[in-house]
Image (cartoon, grey):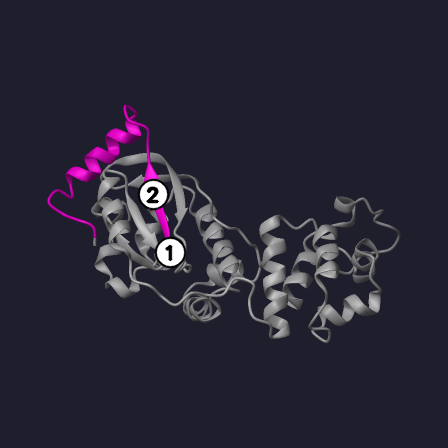
Amino acid sequence: MAEFLKIRRGSIGPAEVGLPIGPGIRRAPGLRREELAALAGVSVDYYTRIEQGRETAPSDAVLGALARALRLTDDEHTHLLALADRTAGRSPRRRPADPQPVRPGLRLLLDSVRPSPAYVLDEVNDVLAANPEGLALMPGLDDWPPAARNTIRYTFLHTAARTLFADWDRVARNCVAHLHSAEPASPGPVAELVDELSSASVEFAALWRRHEVLVKRGGETAFRHPLIGQVTLANEILHHAGGGQRLLVYQAAPGTAEHDALVLLAMTTENAGAS
């Protein structure tokens, strides 16, 4: 919690919150502690104790005031509250569920949405199941053993990803921001993946230190695929109640060039089923 607040304080300038820059040279970017404390309506000493980790149980009202002062998004505010629970040793507001196998209905859904590439993911983006088009959309993913298949690991460690994602920087940044949002509910799996990727990727380590938070809710992704060429696909994310599982589907409207490309991708996976 303390590190998150410090990083957020350093990333927002006085002009962004309506404060004058004032005289003198600012030794560090962002707001000063006394400026943030004044904006949030708390004493400088109290805020300093929070940021130094000496105050581990600030109230929700104080955290809400800090979130407003720092212009946090709803997702970032939720993340701050979860970090506060963890810092104070309280039970998380959203308890992590025990790992659950992929339900037969979700596996059937993977086949039903073909030729749209689709995956069942857990909270840290382990690929629990995928249809053939899903594996084909990410070349080389199926070369890894099932236990190693993770879309964030793929993005940073698989050589094909750099070419596959037309805007790799944005995809990578969103992956890390999502992982931060999953941290309070799944601290163990997140820590394990973060340790692995931080030691293997300088870019991942740098992005992780930025403490950006994003709950993925769908959008668009541009691909440069070796078989179907350049395509931009919409993606939708459906959350399954319980177990932290999500269904990720890439799709295109029928009659478009992108949909034709997905049909072509499906032709390369004939006689294959969801795995």
Mark nearest the camera among 1 and 2 is 1
Residue at the spot 14% in from the left edge and 47% down from the top edge: 272
In the image shown, does 80 or 157 lie closer to the viewer?
80
**Secondary element type, mark 2:** strand
Q: Residue placed at 74% from the left, 50% from the top? A: 13
Q: Secondary structure at mark 1?
A: loop
Asked whether, in this view, residue 63 is left or right of residue 196, the answer is: right
Q: Is residue 7 left or right of residue 147?
A: right
Q: Amino acid at mark 1?
A: Gln
The residue at which mark 1 appears reads as 245
- Local packing at callout 1 (Cα closer than 10 Å; few below 14, some 14-19, many 20+) is many
As for residue 275 lying within the magenta part, the answer is no
- Report the amino acid beneath label 2: Val
Residue 233 location (% of width, % of height): 36, 36
Question: What is the magenta range?
Answer: 245-274
Q: Position of residue 82 (x, y in %)?
A: 59, 63
Q: Where residue 249 is drawn, which disc sits there?
A: 2
**Relative image position of residue 212 (x, y in whole percent):** 57, 55
Left or right, 185 with reference to 161: right
